[in-house]
Amino acid sequence: MQVAITVNGVDHERDVDPRTLLVHFLREELDLTGAKIGCDTSQCGACTVHLDGKVLKSCTLLAVQADGADVTTIEGLAEGGEHHPMQTSFWENHGLQCGYCTPGMIMASAAFAQDNPGASEDEIRHYLEGNICRCTGYHNIVKAVKQVADAAAT
Amino acid sequence: MSTRIFGSGIKRREDPRLITGEARYTDDIKLPGVLHMAVVRSPYAHANIVSIDSSAAEAMDGVVAVYTGEDLDLAGLPTAWLIPDSDLKTPEHPALAKGKVRYVGDGVAMVLADDRYRAQDAADAVVVEYEELPAVIDPEAAAQAGAPLIHDDVEGNIAFTWAPFDKEASDEAFAKADVVVSERILQQRLLPTAMEPRAAMAQFNAATQELTLWCTSQNPHIHRFIISAVTGLNENRVRVIAPEVGGGFGSKIPCYPDEALVSWAAMKLGVPVKWTETRSENYLITIHGRDHVQHVEMAASKDGKLLGVRATVYAGMGGYLSTAAPGIPTILHGLLYVGPYTIDSVYCKSIGVMTNGTPTDAYRGAGRPEATFLLERMVDNVAREIGMDPAELRRRNLIPAFEDGYDVAAGLTYDSGDYPAAFEKALDMAGYDDFRQAQADARSRGRYLGIGVTAYTEMCGLGPSQVAGAVGFQGGLWESATVRVTPTGKVQALIGASPHGQGSETTLAQIISEELGFPVEDIEVVHGDTTETPMGWGTYGSRTTPVTGAALAHASRKLKDKARVLAAHLMEANVDDIEYADGSFSVKGSPDQAQSIQDVALMAHLAWNMPEGMDPGFEESQFYDPPNFVYPFGTHIAIVEVDAETGEIELQRYIAVDDCGPQINPEIVAGQIHGGVVQGVAQALCEGVIYDDNGQLLTGTMQDYCMPKADMFPNFELGETVTPSPHHPIGVKGVGETGTIASTPTVYNAVLDALAPLGVDQIDMPLTSAKVWGAIQAARS
């Protein structure tokens, strides 16, 4: 099937097997391998992207369902050569170790902090339930998200 | 230098590529013409293979080939830890099963197709007829007479019996004791769950006979010689590359069938072959951890002197012996039974049992968490039995501070420790005495608070190679490193270890910067490629900072010695008059005359004006074999509240005081502790593999297996003491596993402390609300 998807501001048209998951489309067709695959039951959130401005686990959607959509992946989050504030905050706060959950974690957190300025630590921890990290124990991830959420509130 | 780089929590050198999605993990790497492998896996835990019909699969679009175990000419996968004095049996482990399958997920056939979806479709179309056999999962049950026999050449399913201690001395210690407490402890199976599933891709050049294998490995040099052994290729024709690796926790140490299969298929077909595990597949086939049934006893005097500990351990090995499996419940377990206490008598009989579960092997802590848990559990049981506060009982039995060597009854020599200092600091941070009052007040109001205290030490920084040999490890445990400085004064440090999330590119650069004065931004640490890096045994056992770090410190010091002589020559001064500070060499008394380390590096490369007998270039290597293990230690405390009506547990506070010697990067140390604690707490509270009676894995996805989430935890309260290792060039100890080792008993004991007034004294882990509620109900009735 033909699909036309805008990814990180670039229009892509492809003929895809109808069963192709969006995450495989991004990774295999477009070689945007920032979105990771960490489970097969939509628990881990490593594949999180933004689709038309909303947070989405890209393993839960077929590429054909994203026809006409505007997708942002971790590769497209930085603007004008500057890291997004959430990328900077993860770096400054040691919010990552092996880095595998990080693209999804940053994509989910970036949208959350923007929508929830001044979010409490409890709210952040609750929100992050959809993104699993095995390395950091979440402590520094929560700190990183809080720093950006606090900045958004001022 | 304005601020000292050693000891500073600088940002990690690895992060720019990770936070932008630019890092390339194995599955991210593309090769033209690659075929995808899917493996047909047994749906039965134990069965004879009657027939395999691959004709339908072979006829499908895009399918290139289907192979079964009979088609392979690969040697079996080796077991590489041959523990002595144990009557060890090492049953054959073929890359694809022949005749019989021994766990759900055991590979039966491999399919190669032009796309990963089509490969999986074709794998589903391979028809295998099985004759199902009775299965056994519980290791104690598998060791009993009449249990289903899993390997014909492993009688009674007993792969080994390891009991190196003096049984009579142990019996005497127990006979003299006022008090003996006992418990049957279940160390449940756990799923390591590195967030990146395993993956492997192989490419073979028939003309040069060179095989390149990209794979998710913690130890590419070990993978190289195992792949060399199973394929028959010369080791110098095998290149293993561990690109970015997304966590391991031990699960990426072993060489699995899948790495051998892609290598073999790439050689057979002459095209690259790739395989990437799904998470469900990962839970079936990548090693599991723990799986002990332990019968434990502790002896004590009635006034609180701990006299002895002993245990019989049934350790589940699963369907085959994984690479390092026999060493985990033995060498890395029984030798740790003394912990930080003055216990004079230890005995451990560890029985390795084949079962129809997934093979087990090293999982974060590997044997030491299982030892620390049983020890700390029994200390709390003694405290309860003799009516002494558990913190006070620990205080009375801690080994006093020592700086250079302390021999313990289990046969180890601890390097250094000040257990009382860490212990008192943790108790202060927790406000232990005040808590006991608050706890009593809460109980009077029908609320159940509990506190758990764990004092621990552990053996890591593996380790002296002579010891490795003596305990049957089929390798050395040294590391090597090269510090290479370019003519323009930039550093490449080549290491044989293979970090995969630990931040070692940063930590190790900080060591070199400290030693030689190069800015940390000018130091690149290169790892994970057997062709680019010198030999090393890998990243596990909290060994990369202590062992590789020591190699780098020594190599740097050799360079500094050379630089000093060259600088003296260039400044026409006596070497003895050269002073060094912050990367600059100057002549005593004339500070205006100076040569920076970069100047010296350039002059060494140019070699226009060298001292008599000095070789050109600016590069040094070091092989470093540690003279002893390192023994980090500390005290962890958890405070919990249990809702007696629902059985739910709230972890309210977690305090960790750890001593890993001088901290090179305190933020990285803290991160290791945070992550380790969460993994250990999750064992206590929610993680656990469940099989049904037929050996079917019921916790086969992340939907069913309880991975710890952010909202289960408070912010952690960390403290430290600093006791350098006396035998280490910079005094550091490992810290990768301490959190996991200490935290499971800490939280478990806190919950049982909360439940004590309700009459509950034992619950098998994990402490789910259903089990806690059930235990409360049972105690009330």
Image (cartoon, helix red, strand yellow):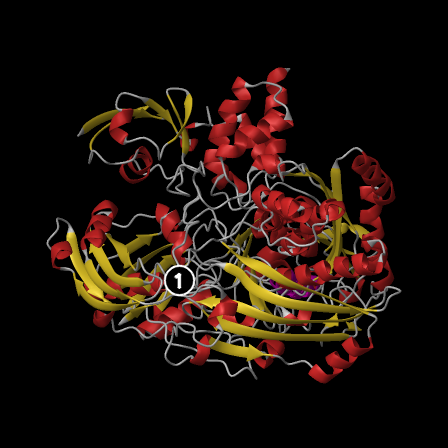
Residue B741 point in image, percent of width and height: 65, 56
Helix, strand, or loop for circle 1? strand
The tally of labels here is 1
Which of the image's four quarters has the N terminus of chain A?
top left
Q: Is residue B205 visible?
A: no
Residue B606 point in image, percent of width and height: 55, 60
Give the main secondary structure, helix, strand or loop, of the magenta stretch.
Answer: helix
Instruction: Tell me which chain the residue with mark 1 is part of.
Output: B
- Identified at 25% across, 36% down, the residue is A20
Residue A149 vs B13, above or below: the answer is above
Question: According to the image, label 1 marks what residue?
Answer: B240
Residue A140 point in image, percent of width and height: 62, 37
Q: Is residue B719 magenta?
A: no
Q: Specify start and end residues of the magenta stretch as a single range.
A: B546-565
Q: Based on the displayed image, in which of its 4 quarters is residue B449 positioned?
A: top right
Which of the image's four quarters has the C terminus of chain A?
top right
- Identified at 48% across, 68% down, the residue is B317
Please state if B524 lies on the left or on the right of B389 as rendered: left
Q: Is residue B326 visible?
A: yes
